[in-house]
Image (spheres, rainbow, N blue to C red):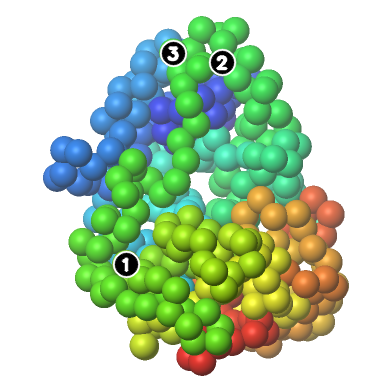
């Protein structure tokens, strides 16, 4: 089978290419550039990652090339990212990138070049059962990335290959070392690709001018000043710069809500503050792996943020919207993030969180 492997320059995609080559597939490696930045101090590692991807392909003896989807990424992912922050929400650009860019533009380019399927280093599995493609959780639960892949459709999953789905990360590292791959000990990338190692607030402020404002308690007391309400998300502790206060209880402060219109960030003390708790949420842009939900009403488990343990819940679907009620209270559910549904290892789909039933303060959301 002719396969294109999306080579990121990291150990995961490199081992994906290694395994496919060992299985005697006709493999070619392609490095995808999704961001261009004129700032030499941006911290973006694209050039170094491209060189690493090229070195791995040379080691394996497979063809290598680069493609550039920076314009498509800005139009289809980054614009939405800015719109969400402007609205006071907390977006997850990786979800949209997988649907629109990696398994959209990139998959189309791979097909046009003669590849039958597109392989990546994602920790996930695909299976064909009862006439449908299924997206399944990876064997390594700590690395599972189905949360970011829930927007893929049947056509995209039919063309997707995830060679690492049945492996543990430790096994991937061992395979890379045994094969002498030059990235065997390379550190995993974290964070959002287009921000790199820059300060997140400084980066965002270049696109969305920020206004300082008050940090208040639920009772309305001003306890500090924020750098821009859009920078904060429910449950956030870092960056508040609120010291000890005589009237406080000594516990750490956490963001519990924002009033974007009035530029106020609300905080409370305690990791498990009642202001951070919710039992239900409303979501939109629902997408179902099978093409339709299991039923108009069904029970399953769900994650309201990446790497959260799955939580039992009840789901009611109304068109492209759904209402979710959890069996137990959930902490710091953030509008703009995704709620992703599961039954066992199978990812059913997901939706973008709009609102929760967490207590509100004034105009906070």
* Residue of label 3: 182
**What is the x, y in percent for residue 49?**
34, 29
Q: Residue at x 23, y 42 (%)?
A: 42
Q: Residue at x 33, y 43 (%)?
A: 196
Q: Secondary structure at mark 1?
A: loop
Q: CA distance from mark 2 to mark 1?
A: 43 Å
Q: CA distance from mark 3 to mark 1?
A: 42 Å
In the image, 1 versus 50, the foreground residue is: 50
Whether residue 114 sits left or right of residue 281 in the image: it is left
Task: Tell me if mark 3 has few (under 14), some (14-19) or many (20+) residues whose alpha carbon lies within 10 angstroms of its own.
Answer: some
Name the mark nearer the viewer: 2 or 1: 1
Most distant residue in the front direction = 246
**What is the x, y in percent for residue 138?**
71, 41
Task: Tell me if mark 1 has few (under 14), some (14-19) or many (20+) residues whose alpha carbon lies within 10 angstroms of its own.
Answer: some
In the image, 144 versus 164, the foreground residue is: 144
Most distant residue in the bottom direction = 362
- The quarter holding residue 346 reads bottom right
The first of marks 2 and 1 along the sequence is: 2
The first of marks 3 and 1 along the sequence is: 3
Q: Is residue 338 visible?
A: no
* Quarter placement of the N terminus: top right
**Residue 227: image tag:** 1
Task: Tell me if mark 2 has few (under 14), some (14-19) or many (20+) residues whose alpha carbon lies within 10 angstroms of its own.
Answer: many
- The quarter holding residue 314 reads bottom right
């Amino acid at each position: 089978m002719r396969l294109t492997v999306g080579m990121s320059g990291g150990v995961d995609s490199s081992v994906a290419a290694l395994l496919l080559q060992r299985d005697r597939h006709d493999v070619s490696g392609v490095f995808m550039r999704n961001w261009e930045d004129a700032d030499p101090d941006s911290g973006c590692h694209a050039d170094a990652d491209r060189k690493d991807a090229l070195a791995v392909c040379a080691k394996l003896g497979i063809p290598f090339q680069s493609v550039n989807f920076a314009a498509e990424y800005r139009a289809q992912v980054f614009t939405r990212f800015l719109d969400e922050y402007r609205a006071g929400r907390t977006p997850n650009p990786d979800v949209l990138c997988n649907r629109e860019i990696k398994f959209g533009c990139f998959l189309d380019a791979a097909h046009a070049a003669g590849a039958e399927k597109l392989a990546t280093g994602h920790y996930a599995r695909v299976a064909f059962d009862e006439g449908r493609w299924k997206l399944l959780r990876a064997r390594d639960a700590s690395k599972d990335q189905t949360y970011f892949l829930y927007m893929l459709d049947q056509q995209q999953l039919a063309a997707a290959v995830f060679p690492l789905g049945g492996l543990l990360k430790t096994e991937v590292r061992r395979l890379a070392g045994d094969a002498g791959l030059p990235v065997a000990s390379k550190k995993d990338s974290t964070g959002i690709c287009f921000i790199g190692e820059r300060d997140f607030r400084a980066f965002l402020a270049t696109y969305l001018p920020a206004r300082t404002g008050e940090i208040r308690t639920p009772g309305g007391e001003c306890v500090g000043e924020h750098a821009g309400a859009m920078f904060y998300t429910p449950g956030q502790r870092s960056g508040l710069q609120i010291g000890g206060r005589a009237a406080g209880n000594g516990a750490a402060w956490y963001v519990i809500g924002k009033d974007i219109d009035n530029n106020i960030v609300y905080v409370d003390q305690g990791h498990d503050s009642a202001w951070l708790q919710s039992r239900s949420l409303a979501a939109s842009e629902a997408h179902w792996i099978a093409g339709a939900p299991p039923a108009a009403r069904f029970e399953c488990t769900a994650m309201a943020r990446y790497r959260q343990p799955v939580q039992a819940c009840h789901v009611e679907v109304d068109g492209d919207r759904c209402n979710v009620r959890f069996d137990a209270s959930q902490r710091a559910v953030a509008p703009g993030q995704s709620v992703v549904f599961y039954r066992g290892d199978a990812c059913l789909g997901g939706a973008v969180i709009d609102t929760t039933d967490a207590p509100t303060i004034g105009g906070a959301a």
